[in-house]
Image (cartoon, helix red, strand yellow):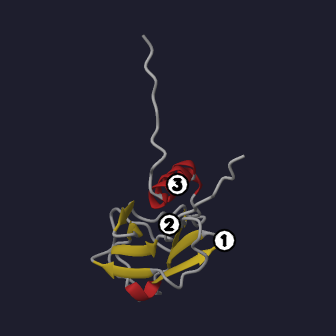
């Protein structure tokens, strides 16, 4: 006996946007933009909460003045550029942290054209960027009956 799997077509539009965005991110995981030193952004969580999409990115060791967030071509760009520090007199035996500029890009949901409505908060080494999801437009089409 075969089972038929049916899908509900009554998903809210915001859920479809989030699902499509997750597919885009999964496809592009290995294609993120990084510097030639292969310095990478920290761990990233992307989730939906209260009508906004949140990008939570670990950026330990940066000051908030050293982080830039912008949008370009339907992508969210995050750049961390450490300021030149004074000559360090420590003699390191091992270095486990990335040094230099780090960059990353993430796809944005359709309908987000600029960074105007985005908000960002940096606290305890974690950058939280909130992107308000576009309001679902209910579309009604009347069908003529012959």
Residue 136 bears which disc, if any?
2
Residue 65 visible in the current orientation:
yes
Q: Which mark is residue 25?
A: 3
User: Separation of disc 2 and disc 1 at Cα?
Assistant: 22 Å
Q: Which residue is mark 1?
A: 73
Please state if 89 lies on the left or on the right of 138 as rendered.
Answer: left
Q: Is residue 85 visible?
A: no
Name the residue located 38 percent from the left edge and 63 percent from the top edge: 48
- Residue depicted at 40% across the width and 64% down the height: 42
Residue 103 lies, with reference to residue 24, above or below; the image says: below
What is the distance, in whole Å, between disc 1 and disc 3 at their CAs? 15 Å
Q: Answer yes or no: do the residues labelled 1 and 3 have beta carbons within 8 Å? A: no
Q: Mark 2 touching mark 1, by CB under 8 A? A: no
Secondary element at tag 1? loop
Closest to the observer, 46 or 83: 46
Q: Nearer the viewer, residue 5 or 27?
A: 5
In the drawing, does residue 124 fall left or right of residue 141?
Answer: left
| Secondary structure at numbered mark 2 | loop
The numbered mark, 1 or 3, whose residue comes first in the sequence reads 3
State the image coordinates of residue 54 (x, y, percent, origin top left). 40, 68
Q: Position of residue 127 (x, y in %)?
A: 37, 74
Residue count near mark 3 (Cα–Cα under 10 Å), binned few <14, some 14–19, many ≥20: some
Q: Quadrant of the N terminus?
A: top left
Residue 18 placement, left or right of 141: left
Residue 49, x across and y down, in percent: 34, 66
Q: The residue tagged with tag 3: helix, strand or loop?
A: helix
Image position, residue 123 (x, y; %): 29, 79
Instruction: Using a 10 Å C-alpha cutoff, classify the residue at mark 1 as few (fewer than 14 neighbours), some (14 to 19) or many (20 or more).
Output: few
* Residue 55 sits in quarter: bottom left
**Dot 2: within a 10 Å radius of its alpha carbon, few (fewer than 14), some, or many (20 or more) residues?**
few
């Amino acid at each position: 006996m075969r089972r038929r799997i049916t899908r509900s077509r009554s998903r809210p539009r915001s859920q479809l946007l989030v699902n499509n965005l997750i597919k885009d991110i999964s496809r592009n995981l290995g294609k993120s933009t990084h510097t030639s030193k292969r310095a990478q952004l920290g761990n990233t969580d992307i989730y939906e909460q209260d009508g906004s999409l949140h990008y939570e990115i670990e950026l330990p060791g940066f000051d908030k003045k050293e982080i830039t967030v912008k949008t370009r071509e339907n992508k969210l760009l995050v750049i961390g550029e450490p300021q030149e520090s004074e000559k360090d007199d420590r003699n390191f035996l091992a270095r486990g942290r990335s040094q230099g500029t780090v960059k990353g890009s993430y796809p944005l949901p359709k309908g987000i054209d600029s960074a105007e409505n985005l908000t960002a908060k940096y606290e305890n080494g974690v950058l939280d960027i909130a992107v308000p999801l576009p309001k679902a437009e209910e579309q009604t089409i009347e069908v003529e009956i012959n």
